[in-house]
Image: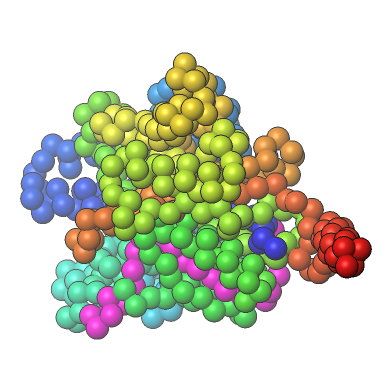
Amino acid sequence: MYSVLKGASYFLAHTPDMVVHNGTTQTTEKRVKPDSDYLKEIVHGLRDYEACVAYPPNQVYIGNMTPDELAELPMPWYDKRVEAKRQGTFGEIMPQDEFIGMMKICDVFDLVKLNESFSKAVKAKLEAHPLVDNALLAGLDKYAGAAEITELVKNAGAEPIYLHGEVIGCVKAAHDIDDSLSAHVIFENLVSKASCVVSVLHLVHQTGVKKEEVEYVIECSEEACGDMNQRGGGNFAKAAAEMAGLINATGSDVRGFCAGPTHALVQAASLVKAGVFKQVVVAAGGSTAKLGMNGKDHLKKGLPILEDCVAGFAVLISENDGVSPELNTDILGRHTVGTGSAPQNVISSLTFAALEKAGLKLTDVDKYSVEMQNPDITKPAGAGNVPEANYKMIGALAAMKGQIQKTELNSFVEKHGMTGWAPTQGHIPSGVPYLGFARQEMLAERIERAMFVGKGSLFLGRMTNLFDGISFVLQKNSGTNQADGITEARVQQLIAASLREFAGHLAGKLEE
């Protein structure tokens, strides 16, 4: 019996200072061209919090707008505003100061040092947050003096923490000589952990699952924690579970570049279907490295820096309740070692091949969730409209296989595709942003089947030239209930099978 999707949460933290001081594009520029015009101009291209919250794709990400509503807005979107709601159906958009506070809360080795005035101010703000309890807030009671912070930054390799251009704290290195525990890496990992933790807290609140009932957590971001002896040893999953209060959970990390979340969801669905665990959370934090990644192109074309948010998500996979959408693990698309890197082969292996094996056509899938990159970000950078390009490839494949006419390509894209809305942080756009909407659509009986496609660039790690990808189908619940054991439909199937067996046995006797 298939496992089900009980809920999905999505989180954004607006972090403009981290764009300037922690995004890889900017930190690299500081090393190779410290006097560049780009570094001088970037501060003038940063959005304030209100503009970030009112940005239409961000409101879609947290569930206050639908992808269809976004598609109705003419592009570009960066110069348009909708109602600025911090809280959404799926999660929230947190301001930078509160997120820095969450980094301190998630620090269990006293590596984050914040000054007294900031600590007190942010604690007062987070006390009003409905998901942050007193046990978490205690982490903000310890603060550092300005002289200590200055000394750590100047002479101990600490990574400064900025708010509105001013240093209000720092992240210490966790080891004197271990590069894997440098202040820069610890900073990145704490950002990833904090955004993951808030995503999990929203998921628990949204689904109503009891924290003690979650048995396993799979973390699938693009960061890796460890030391010089085991650089990617992990475990973000256990670290986030601890901070979120999932006291009965264990867990592990899954990595696959952009395809990581889809691999993790398949594993979670399989664990629940097999009866190993009843409640599994799949979650991921965001990446500071990719903040402002396309910033140079944006500023050149008169756009603000649009990659100014750290993103996160969390998903709950549970036993079949007879209502929630099912993860059909019998329909899995796989980019195998022998698939190759030709675009047609890649998309065929992830869509057509799996569906054909299940007796389905490409047109039998109501919606495909692919790399849901926000085209407002990617088009000015020369990367085009990534979701649209994927949908056109799927549509062309359907035409090639005779499932649609060539003249129907545009209508196929419109019917089975969506506009992109997710931040460009690799694992974040890769299929998963649509899980929350898909669940809503299936419960409302507006769609029956959606395919989630994750693709990854393994060659970035310089260990293989192979591409990667995996896909699965989410479908409307068949009405079965794992907790109730055998269903009425199954009883009817068994009766029919028994009658056929009896009829065959009776026919044999008559022949004798």
Q: Quadrant of the N terminus?
A: bottom right
Residue at 38 percent of width and 75 percent of height: 234
Residue at 20 percent of width and 74 percent of height: 179
Marks counted in the figure total 0
The one nearer the camera, 364 or 87, is 364
The one nearer the camera, 401 or 457, is 401
Is 164 contained in the magenta span?
no
Q: Name the dominant secondary structure of the magenta segment.
A: loop
The one nearer the camera, 62 or 369, is 369
Dividing the picture into quadrants, the one containing residue 337 is: bottom left
Q: Which residues are magenta?
A: 207-231
- Across and down, in percent, residue 106 comes to 46, 71
Is 328 placed left or right of 371 in the picture?
A: right
- Across and down, in percent, residue 48 comes to 41, 39
- Across and down, in percent, residue 120 comes to 48, 65
Residue at 53 percent of width and 44 percent of height: 356
Residue 330 visible in the picture: yes
